[in-house]
Image: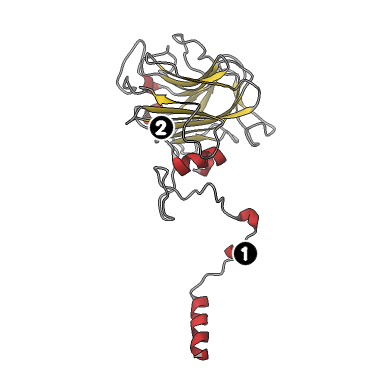
Amino acid sequence: MKFLFILASISTLVGCQFDGSNLRGAEDAPNTEVDADVGSDGSSGDANAPTPSYSAYWSFDNDVSDATGVHDGVLSGPAALTSGGRGFGGGEALELLADGARMDISNPREFDFNSDFTWHAYIRTNDGSGAVFSRNPLGSEWNQGSKALFIRSNDVDWDTGWVSNPHTRVRVDDGEWHQIIATFEANTDRLNIFVDPSVGDTSGSYSDTHDINRFDEHTHNHLSGIAETGFSLGQANFTGGLSDLGTLEGLIDEAAIFDRALVGKELDLLIAQGPSAL
């Protein structure tokens, strides 16, 4: 019997891999509150499930390229990258220095904001108004089908052209970093705008139905264009039509777009660790 026990023990050891992973310190232990092993709908997934990904992600560290390689930025006006680790958590950020500064996005027609989506950014500003994200015909006025996440009268707002202007009533013009997330679920028309959320939050500072896709952004031609022809960070409303959509002077960092409304563990991961974690 003793001989059989020794053979079984040897067999168990041979079948194991010893790579030191079980010797890691507490600082390397996984986050027990926010687990990256989630499905694309925010539910628990298995270890073999595809890693969730963004449609576009601009870290602004070193350049204005998109991590997916599809939606690189093009700086316009007095816009630049910061230096000296002035971005969120260090590194660089998009700096909007004066009116007219923005970053236009390559291949804007690839996005689909008639359907579910999530927009994310950290912002830092002392300014009381201006755009963070805007979906608007490039170089033209505010249109039906246009969409913007922006600052108006010092707090975070949303506007969909010729639909309505939801308010969060959360002030962010204090020169501190703020995390802003907008999620939209098309089947329920549910819009959530989170400002400095905590892990576990399920409703934003604004949470209600909003008919974002009333006007088809791919086909609806109004005034001087179709909404899908442009997407910008830092400025919208190029020739008029809606107040407070000029340049938001300050910093934008860790900007990202997702082609789904993040919920559950995915949303928690975004809140806790930012877009790079997804």
Q: Position of residue 5 (x, y in %)?
A: 51, 85
Q: Position of residue 225 (x, y in %)?
A: 36, 15
Dot 2: within a 10 Å radius of its alpha carbon, few (fewer than 14), some, or many (20 or more) residues?
many
- Residue 117 is tagged as 2
Dot 1: within a 10 Å radius of its alpha carbon, few (fewer than 14), some, or many (20 or more) residues?
few
Spatial separation of the CA atoms under disc 2 and disc 1:
41 Å
How many numbered circles does the render carry? 2
In the image, is 110 to the left or to the right of 123? left
Mark 2 residue element: strand
Q: Observer-nearest residue: 72 or 234?
A: 234
Q: Amino acid at mark 1?
A: Leu
Q: Is residue 274 visible?
A: no
Sequence order check: which comes first, mark 2 or mark 1? 1
Q: Which residue is mark 1?
A: 23
Q: Position of residue 161 (x, y in %)?
A: 39, 15
Occupied quadrant, residue 142? top left
Q: Amino acid at mark 2?
A: Phe
Which residue is painted at 50% across and 15% down in the image? Answer: 245
Q: Observer-nearest residue: 262 or 201?
A: 201
